[in-house]
Amino acid sequence: MSFDIQAATDRLMRFLAVEGVTGKEAAIGRELTAALQEGGVPADAIRLDDANTRIPVPTETGNLIVDLPGRGAMHNQPRIMFMTHMDTVPLCAGAKPKVAGRKIVNQAKTALGGDNRCGCGVLVTLAAELAKQKLDHPPITLLFCVREESGLWGARRVKTQDIRSPIMAFNYDGGSASNVTIGAVGADRWQVEIFGRASHAGSRRSAGSVRP
Amino acid sequence: MILALALADVKAGGWFGKVVKGKRQGTSNVGPVTGGDGRPAGDATNVVTDYVHVRGESRSHDAKFFKEITKAYKTAFEKAAKRVKNSEGKSGRVKFKAETDYYPFRMKESLPVVKRAAAAVSDIGGTPTIRAANGGLDANWMVRHGVPTVTFGAGQNEPHTTDEWINLDEYDRACALAVQLATTR
């Protein structure tokens, strides 16, 4: 499919320039909202959910959810969803992105934030191209999750009625566009408290005499 | 000392790092060892440390197996606590807590979402690689919510490091793929 490659790169650079470490997604949420509107998405199709009120760690904002009604011959087909996450790891704070050939690199000694501003760029480019090229498509939900990097919380706490119950979803988070990831590990996190018996290292423990 | 004995036991039993038991595989790691709330573990060299807080994780594609790995840690800590006694013969004790962070999933390749995903990769001139991830994804929760979800890359490389960079060719392909997926009849 043809699309405006320069506009897509410009969008990615724009999102990389906005700091938005995990739990602090308000600014990148505003930037995404502005870029979506510039791409032709009406303001009333874009909103934030209240997932952050159900996340047990402080989170500035909810997930950003966009509803694109279906168009043309496919407007009645079942709804599908495209998703990504809009937070970065804390190591990305202060990144200075620069285009170098067919790469984007970082001029600061931080992580860059391609994880996951790349996904943000893909979803906004999709919305902009569907509008600009007036392409036929089924009803589409776009979901930009918060707090992926600190416990997958946005996706964990999103309500299916808020994303309008799509029949399938495509998530963007990784390296190669040819990788079709259909499974993932599960995990436990555990903690243990060990209670010993405080005593003078040279006395009761060894039953010896008390020395300083 | 309880911590050292417990971890030695875990390692001897083959439960640390990459864990392989027959056909089942997983991983485990021991993370921060502290005195709790950001304090160091122990106060002075001449005081026997009476409190240590340790955090760790267990992962597997097998929903039962990562819980088994966690259980091996729990058992090792409990055994170690009983083995360390002070001069009065009193042993220490441990309080072990585990919770599931996210659940594993594996979708059938015959599912419409997987077929549509693989077909779209071919349509834009790529060769689809069907795979499973060794880390958690937002897709873990979407699948749990009843929405079958395939995950693609979009150009990120060496994430979470200061060497991170973006492959613009893959990013462009991910954009083309999204338009293809959205407009496939």
Image (cartoon, rainbow, N blue to C red):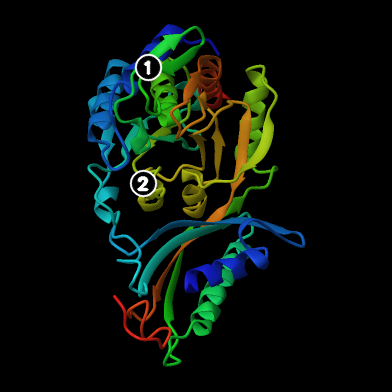
| Figure check: A37 above or below A200 | above
Residue B73 visible in the picture: yes
Q: Mark 2 = which residue? A: A154
Task: Tell whether A182 sits left or right of A85.
Answer: right
In the image, residue B7 lies at what x, y percent?
Answer: 55, 66
Q: Chain of mark 2?
A: A
Numbered disc 2: secondary structure: helix
Q: Residue at x 37, y 49 (%)?
A: A153
Q: Mark 1 = which residue? A: A107
N-terminal of the pair, mark 1 or mark 2, is 1
Q: Amino acid at mark 2?
A: Gly
| Figure check: A32 above or below B141 | above
C-alpha separation, residue under disc 1 versus residue under disc 2: 30 Å
Q: Amino acid at mark 1?
A: Gln
Estimate how packed mark 1 is, as few (under 14), some (14 to 19) or many (20 or more) residues with alpha carbons within 10 Å.
few
Q: Residue at x 46, y 17 (%)?
A: A135
In the image, residue A103 lies at what x, y percent?
Answer: 49, 14
In depth, the one of A201 and A140 nearer the eye is A201
Estimate how packed mark 2 is, as few (under 14), some (14 to 19) or many (20 or more) residues with alpha carbons within 10 Å.
many
